[in-house]
Amino acid sequence: SQQGEEDPQALSIQEGENATMNCSYKTSINNLQWYRQNSGRGLVHLILIRSNEREKHSGRLRVTLDTSKKSSSLLITASRAADTASYFCATSPYQGGKLIFGQGTELSVKP
Amino acid sequence: DVKVTQSSRYLVKRTGEKVFLECVQDMDHENMFWYRQDPGLGLRLIYFSYDVKMKEKGDIPEGYSVSREKKERFSLILESASTNQTSMYLCASSSVGQGHTDTQYFGPGTRLTVL
């Protein structure tokens, strides 16, 4: 079952611009994670935000979480062509369990 | 660094063949997962295992079985491959317990084509 829904499905920007992707989910969560997937490869974990956190930073990544709206956003600042990939949010309903992945946002950063 | 390896990057099989996809992780993780990924459908969980010889069905287990005889290895078996099982198959592992989150570490994927 798919819980996370990403928006937009596809995003095309110029190098240097910021990219914002959104994720909505349906049930309560223990944490929410963002992953990146380069074309034809496996997923790579980017960042995790716990349900009691509102914002988290890692390098050029900024994640926010609004549990009242059941939504999260991933901001990539000063994007680079190498950021071109698909980005997935994944929710963890409880510690030690499965992750539920959204369908992803396909980001294209043009040089 | 955690390393998850999958036995093949590309695989071509014929309808009706028995297919084995192998996944090995080197970080002593308790949990292992098999997903398939199709355009427009995202990642769908086929099976997961939280311990040796333990398995649980995911969202789409039909037509698949799994085996976990050793902690580091999780095998996905297609008993009789069909064309609708043509897909990208992703294996992942994660650790549980205090101090660990549910972060999953993925292998590079196996693109299976069934003719």
Image (cartoon, coloured by chain):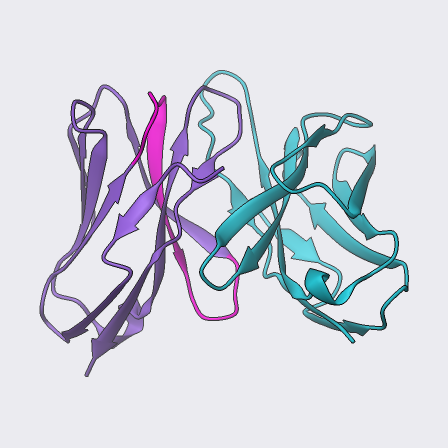
Chain colours: A purple, B cyan
- Which quadrant of the rendered structure holds the C terminus of chain A? bottom left
Residue B33 position, x and y percent, is 63, 40
The vertical placement of B34 against A60, above or below, is above
The stretch drawn in magenta includes residue A32: yes
Q: Residue at x 30, y 70 (%)?
A: A84
Q: Start and end of the magenta stretch?
A: A25-42
- Tell me: residue A40, above or below residue A21: below
Q: Residue furthest bottom?
A: A111
Is A92 on the left-hand or right-hand side of A17? right
**Along the viewing direction, whichever of B91 and B45 lies nearer the viewer:** B45
The prevailing secondary structure element of the residues shown in magenta is loop
Going 90% across and 59% down the picture, which residue do you hit?
A: B18
Left or right position of B104 against A28: right
Q: Is residue A86 visible?
A: yes
Q: Quadrant of residue A73?
A: top left
Can the viewer see residue B1 in this picture? no
Q: Picture coordinates of residue B74 (x, y %)?
A: 76, 42
Q: Name the residue at the left extreme.
A: A17
Q: In the rendered structure, does residue A61 fall within the stretch colored magenta?
A: no
Q: Residue at x 49, y 37 (%)?
A: A1
Query: Can you give x and y, in whole percent of width and height, for residue A4 in the image?
Result: 35, 40
The residue closer to the viewer here, B39 or B88, is B39
Give the vertical position of A12 relative to B92 (above or below): below
| Position in image of residue B20 (x %, y %) | 83, 56
